[in-house]
Image (cartoon, rainbow, N blue to C red):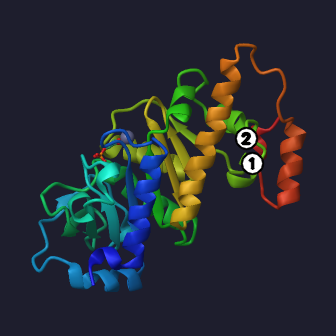
Amino acid sequence: MKITDVPVVQRFIRFCEDGWNQGWHERNGGNLTYRLTQAETDALRPFFDRVPRPWTDMGVQGTNLAGAYFLATGSGKYFRNVPLDAADCLCVVEIDSTGSRYRVVWGLVNGGRPTSEFPSHFMNHSVRARATQGECRVIYHAHPANITALTFVLPLTDRDFSRALWKSETECPVVFPGGVGVVEWMVPGGAEIALATSKKMEEYDAVVWAHHGLFASGPDFDTTFGLMHTIEKAAQIYVLALGCGQGIRQTIPDDGLRAIAREFGVTIREAFLD
Ligand code: 13P
Ligand code: ZN
């Protein structure tokens, strides 16, 4: 039995392949982390290094995730290569008992470290796990072109983005009735953007990074990939409509959004409706 035969690893690899096929992961763009269950950690433990690598400080702290284990993409690794060589591109990391350091216990066999966005992933996991009573397990960052394009033309507010996306595709208020958060442009890869993003993640399960990409969260791989896909598709429709050059002539009315929410039994963020 190889580690790539373990179902959770197979699902993680397929996710990376799907993201690559969508065109959201040029070069090493984007990253994925999954918080393993106890049973999944036990299934992977036989593959762990006999001597774990040194602890690394994350610059952020999430005490509710002390002792957790994550599957993660490596920094500088290409999503395109994950199905070809998972042991080179991926790793399992263990969080220490203070929730502020990690160490690699499997993977990255040719050297390297977890994604440079691990502080953002970890803080988002911490916040979303708390907000969902432990349900959230997946944090996904990608570079889809259309949602990023909108950060050049829409005001960088949660309200403006949520409304534009909800009104671009009828399914949107059902898939993300809470809307999306927006973080202004910041230098990626550190504690500062991690804290700004996780603050938004207290309220939203998806957060746009201006001029960069999108973070999505969810309880499982399908829901999280689906959220990323739905938001990017709505953004694409909006960009296509704007590209016709006539402006937006008509759209879904606010009372229409309320009616969808009623019909589908979801609570839409009323503060964003007129
Ligand atoms: P990593 O290769 O370190 O995961 O970085 C890619 C990226 O998208 C940074 O925001
Ligand atoms: Zn990025």
In the picture, measured across the screen, residue 72 lies left or right of residue 141, that is: left
Which percent across, then down, holds residue 146? 55, 32
Q: Position of residue 166 (x, y in %)?
A: 73, 41
Residue at image mark 1: 173
Task: Answer whether residue 203 is visible to the viewer in this image.
Answer: no
Q: Any mark on residue 166, and which?
A: 2
Is disc 2 placed on a helix, strand or loop? helix
Judge by depth and name the residue closer to the eye, 164 or 60.
164
Q: Amino acid at mark 1?
A: Pro
Establish whether ligand 2 lies closer than 8 Å to the Cβ of label 2.
no
Do tag 2 and tag 1 residues touch (Cβ < 8 Å)? yes
The mark nearer the N terminus, 2 or 1, is: 2
* Mark 1: secondary structure: helix
Residue at 45 percent across and 42 percent down: it is 24
Name the residue: 25% across, 71% down.
Answer: 96
Front-lying residue, 22 or 259 = 22
